[in-house]
Image (cartoon, rainbow, N blue to C red):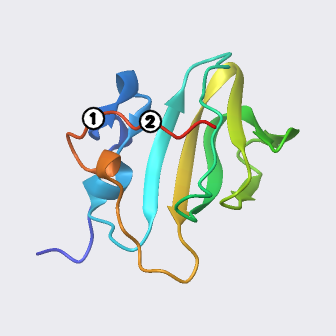
Amino acid sequence: MADYDVKRIDEMDAALGGAFKRARAELGVESFGMQVLDLPPNLDQYPEHDHAEVGQEEVFVVMRGSAEIEIDGERVALDPDTIVRVVPKARRKIYTGDQGARILALGGVPGAAYEPSASSKIGAPAPVPASR
């Protein structure tokens, strides 16, 4: 077994029409959540949600394009020079601009061992965030 894994993002298992790429599962990462979001231009239908119930915080890193993330009603720019962390209880929703965006989303529960969600496993049904 090799000491590393290499996968092309566009060849990863995906859901939601290719928008949700299962990077964690494809690379065999077991210590934290990691997905790649390929979001189309002018998206406003990304579901608003939080992770209060499971306690997961998230970090968002834009790989290309740009977007805004609305966190508890405040919009923050997402671009390749900006990294955003969102606490579990904060409501979040992503909006893209004219170029769309490729976003690396990282997640985990502070102080707890990582447990992969069912939707992050290869071939699983599309994720459905809780929207309250």
Q: Where is residue 34 in the image (x, y as percent from the top left)?
A: 45, 56
Q: In which quarter of the image is residue 70?
A: top right
Above/below status of 71 relative to 52:
above
Q: Which of 119 and 100 is in front in this view?
A: 119
On the rendered image, what quadrant is the N terminus found in? bottom left
Image point 56% across, 20% down: which residue? 40
Whether residue 6 is visible to the viewer of this picture, yes or no, is: no
Task: Tell which residue pokes out farthest to the left in this image.
Answer: 1
Q: What element carries label 1?
A: loop
Image point 58% across, 65% down: which residue? 55
Q: What element carries label 2?
A: loop
Q: Where is residue 13 in the image (x, y as percent from the top left)?
A: 26, 39
Left/right placement of residue 43 relative to residue 39 reads right
Q: Where is residue 21 in the image (x, y as percent from the top left)?
A: 38, 40
Residue kind at label 2, given as amino acid type: Val
Count of numbered circles on the image: 2
On the rendered image, what quadrant is the C terminus found in? top right
Above/below status of 109 relative to 82:
below
Task: Tell which residue pokes out farthest to the bottom in this image.
Answer: 111
Q: In which quarter of the image is residue 74?
A: top right
Above/below status of 10 relative to 44:
below
Whether residue 25 is visible to the viewer of this picture, yes or no, is: yes
Q: Nearer the viewer, residue 53 or 119?
A: 53
Q: Name the residue under label 2.
A: 128
Q: Mark 1 points at which residue?
A: 125
Residue kind at label 1, given as amino acid type: Pro
Q: Which numbered disc covers residue 42?
A: none
Q: In which quarter of the image is residue 92?
A: top right
Left/right placement of residue 44 relative to residue 70 reads left
Q: Nearer the viewer, residue 39 or 127?
A: 127
How much space separates mark 2 and mark 1, taking CA atoms?
9 Å
Left/right placement of residue 114 relative to residue 104 reads left
